[in-house]
Amino acid sequence: MNYKEYGKQNKDVVILLHGGGLSWWNYREEAEMLQNDFHVIIPILDGHAESDREFTTIENNAKEVISFIEEEFGGSVLLIGGLSLGGQILLEILSRRGDICRYAFVESALVVPSRYTYAMIKPVFGSCYGLIHHRWFSKLQFKSLRMKKELFNNYYRDTCAITKQDMIAFLQANSLYSIKESIRNCTAKVSVFVGEKENSAMKTSAKIIHEKLKGSLLQIFPKMYHGEFSLNHAGDYVKEIYAIVKQ
């Protein structure tokens, strides 16, 4: 597993799992703000730019992160956060090792499987994958994702670096993931985030996660779309971390 690291001299460890199709820069601003007080690690998920292996499954990514924490930090860290695909991997981690962190931030994680979406991914991306190498097409995709414009060069560079096989694999995995019942054994204090402007499946997913994790906090951010909280509002994301760990 490859990863970016900030504030290595600090004891309290924060791990942040980026969204599908993105990379470590998803959380770069947060890491820079946190590095004076925390040891921040941003793993690069399998199948993404700068990763060291192809994407296989959400479950395998979860196993890798768990092994990393066990080998490097004695089996537990202060906080793990994850966006979208990273949020699904975080849920899988918590379902396998509910005591692996004291706090968890799950942002915009889909847990309502869609067979239709799964079936459409391969033909759609098989036919239009080549377009992602054109800046004009990437700009259209980027605009639809509503990320702040400063992130475009990172997005374009790293999207072009993802193979068609990997892109199809992680999108299909994302479309079929469902939360495990063992998540109910999680002892971490979990915050669940979703944007008011996200689709109904994503908002339903947030409620399902909240219901299965007793004592969790559900926050629905007004006027926000998918992933906007961590991608476009790093300062507010960091404030949430300080607020919860300093209680």
Image (cartoon, rainbow, N blue to C red):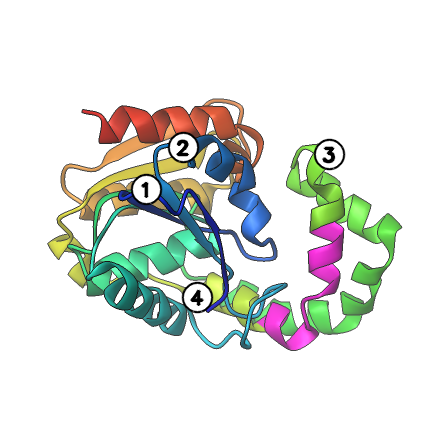
Earlier-in-chain disc, 2 versus 1: 1
> Which circle's residue, 1 or 4, is located before the other in the chain?
1
The magenta-colored residue range is 155-168
Res. 176 mark: 4
Tell me the tag on residue 149. Answer: 3
Amino acid marked by disc 4: Leu
- Position of 27 compared to 138: left or right? left
Foreground pick, 146 / 25: 25
Residue depth check, mark 1 versus mark 4: number of the one nearer the observer: 1
Element type at mark 3: helix
Examine the image and state in which quarter residue 211 appears: top left
Looking at the picture, which amino acid does disc 2 mark?
Answer: Asn
Residue 169 in sight from this viewpoint: yes
- Closest to the camera, between mark 4 and mark 3, is 3
Q: Which residue is mark 1?
A: 10
Inspect the magenta stretch and tell me whether residue 158 lies in it: yes
Position of residue 72 measured from the top left corner of the image (x, y, whole percent): 29, 63
Marks 1/4 in contact by CB < 8 Å: the verdict is no
Whether label 2 touches label 1, CB < 8 Å: yes
Query: Mark 2 sits on what residue?
Result: 36
Q: Are marks 3 and 1 in contact (CB under 8 Å)?
A: no
* 155 in relation to 105, above or below: below
Which residue is at a point 54% across and 76% down the rendered structure image? Answer: 53
